[in-house]
Image (cartoon, helix red, strand yellow):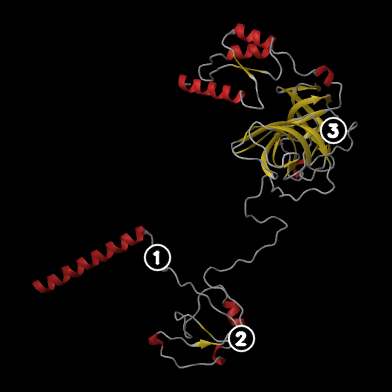
Amino acid sequence: MDSSHLKNTLKSIRTLLKQPGVRKHFYHIRDEDDAIVSAKSIKPNRTVPVICVSNITGENLGLLRKFLNLLPVRREWETLAELPVQVAIDMVYLNVPEVKTVVGGLVEQGCVYIGDALTLGPDEEGKFRQVTIRGIQVKRVNVKKVEAGAHACFAVSSEEEELEGIPGGLRKGMVLLDLKTEPTPEAYWRFEAFITILFASGTIQTNFQALLHCHGFRQKARIFLLNDPSGLRTGERALVQFEFMFQSEFIREGMHLVFIEGSTKGIGSITRLIRVDQPPERTRFNSGNTRPRLGSRTKDSPLRKPTSPLVSAVPVDPSRIYDVSCSISRNEEITTNTCVSDINQQVPNQSALPQKQVDTSEGECSPLQSPLILQMPTEGKPKNTQSKREKRHSSTRKEKKQMNDDEASFNIYSD
């Protein structure tokens, strides 16, 4: 990286850490002594150590590894291993040879053994399904058990149904839970959180939609302000409620979250879970866990009958008489597919209609007594369907023909 770009990056980091609601100290680590001092005397939630590394030249990568090894453990994994099983899924593999379905993630609590019966979910409908652990791998090595703090892959299977047929499909953000301690786990649509606005281009009001990242999943959510009806701005803190827009998620109190929408960014933590009697109106997932496109027809929406842009039939009072466009006479055949059947139904016998002798050379047309109006396009000329290449070849052929005719006439004249 260029020295000027590096200075601008460090300057932007310093500016971000000085913003209201952040207020953290910037500490630049340049050598091993700085790494040791920072790792031993680091203050939680107050100091932000910064190491400049290069993935091209490998500069300071060794210093980064030493700093990470010197950091104190933030979680007591030995204590968490005694709690019920909870695995946060962040990888999904389908149709693996001889195994079929494999999920991977961090074991946050408990110990997982081969043959354990766990619950997997939530799916698109907020339900959990019982699965059995058929195999465990850690760093591509088969093991019989795995404890809290390890990242592992699990071969899972279900006796009730195929896991590939789960509504919405397997996805990141699902969890594996202990079936004994939590026989009926619950997914939530709404929760309360204490947030801090890092930056907002405007004012955040109720019903503001942002992309929420929490516990391995990401989903659009609405924000409902509780105590600040005037809105939230950069650096402000508030207690708000979030509501998921597509499906319920497995969340717990104390989980941290990040929400982003354009240049608006914010952080927070979940303080309370809210149960709702009726799920909010939502947009259903398509197959493959993808959001429907804007304007696409969903499963429950009615199919609209397409209308022709050229000819449309409008019912009118049959006692009135209307004129058809001069471009269509009685002896001409209507070639437009749209509304031909309607015309035949409404006017079964054209000879039975009142005729009138009109001089069509002056641009007049014969009146028709019909309950239909044929609306023809009056603006624009018909497009020439010939391509540029065809036009060029046709003009070349015309020129050659003209030259041959001229040459033939010259030979006749000379003879």
Q: Residue furthest front?
A: 230
Q: Quadrant of residue 362?
A: bottom left
Disc ID at residue 63: none
Q: Quadrant of the C terminus?
A: bottom left
Disc ID at residue 318: 2
Disc 1 crowd rating (10 Å Cα; few below 14, some 14-19, many 20+) is few
In the visual, does 274 lie left or right of 375? right
Q: Earlier in the sequence, mark 1 or mark 2?
A: 2
Asked if residue 2 can be seen in this view, the reply is: no
| Mark 2 to mark 3 CA distance (whole Å) | 72 Å
Q: Earlier in the sequence, mark 2 or mark 3?
A: 3
Residue at 62% from the left image edge and 52% from the top image edge: 294
Amino acid marked by disc 3: Leu
Under tag 2, what secondary structure? loop
Q: Residue furthest left?
A: 414
Pinpoint residue 353: horizontal percent, then vertical percent: 55, 91
Q: Quadrant of residue 172?
A: top right
Pinpoint residue 390: horizontal percent, then vertical percent: 35, 61
Pinpoint residue 269: horizontal percent, then vertical percent: 75, 30
Pinpoint residue 100: horizontal percent, then vertical percent: 74, 36
In the visual, does 272 lie left or right of 44? right
Residue at 48% from the left image edge and 21% from the top image edge: 1
Amino acid marked by disc 1: Asn
Q: In this figure, which residue is indicated by the disc labeled 1? A: 384
In the visual, does 36 lie left or right of 75? left
Q: In this figure, which residue is indicated by the disc labeled 3? A: 118
Amino acid marked by disc 2: Pro
Q: Quadrant of residue 308?
A: bottom right
Q: Is residue 414 above or below residue 73?
A: below
